[in-house]
Amino acid sequence: MSEVKNPCIQVCRYDDEGICIGCYRSKQEAVNWVFLSIEQKREVIRRTAERKNSMKTESNNYDHYV
């Protein structure tokens, strides 16, 4: 299995629910990233995609950094 790319885009700001507005990870997911297995990282990526789709607005769209 190949490594899962870290989704961080260097926009580390968290909303009121503790979700990064840059990569859509929770604080805990971001802190623990280096310790997660490949499967756990894939699960985090799946959750970030769900969050991104449910949270996307003009004011928090940082896709241009990627």
Image: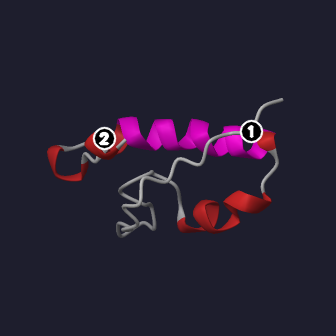
Q: Where's residue 23, x and y in %?
A: 44, 51
Q: Is 49 covered by the magenta stretch?
A: yes
Q: Which residue is mark 1?
A: 3
Q: State which quarter of the image contains the C terminus.
A: top left
Q: How many marks?
A: 2
Q: Where's residue 44, x and y in %?
A: 63, 45
8 sits to left or right of 59: right
Q: Which label is found at residue 38?
A: none
Could you say which is closer to the camera, residue 28 or residue 12? 12
Q: State which quarter of the image contains the N terminus.
A: top right
Q: Which residue is mark 2?
A: 63
Residue range highlighted in magenta: 39-53
Observer-side mark, 2 or 1, equals 1
Q: Residue furthest left?
A: 58
Image quadrant assignment for residue 54: top left
Identified at 35% across, 57% down, the residue is: 21
| Amino acid bearing label 2 | Asp
Q: Main secondary structure of the magenta part?
A: helix
Q: Earlier in the sequence, mark 2 or mark 1?
A: 1
| Amino acid bearing label 1 | Glu
Q: Residues within 10 Å of mark 1 (few under 14, many from 20)?
A: few
Could you say which is closer to the camera, residue 17 or residue 46? 46
Image quadrant assignment for residue 13: bottom left
66 sits to left or right of 57: right
Q: Where's residue 14, x and y in %?
A: 39, 68
Mark 2 lies on a secondary structure that is helix
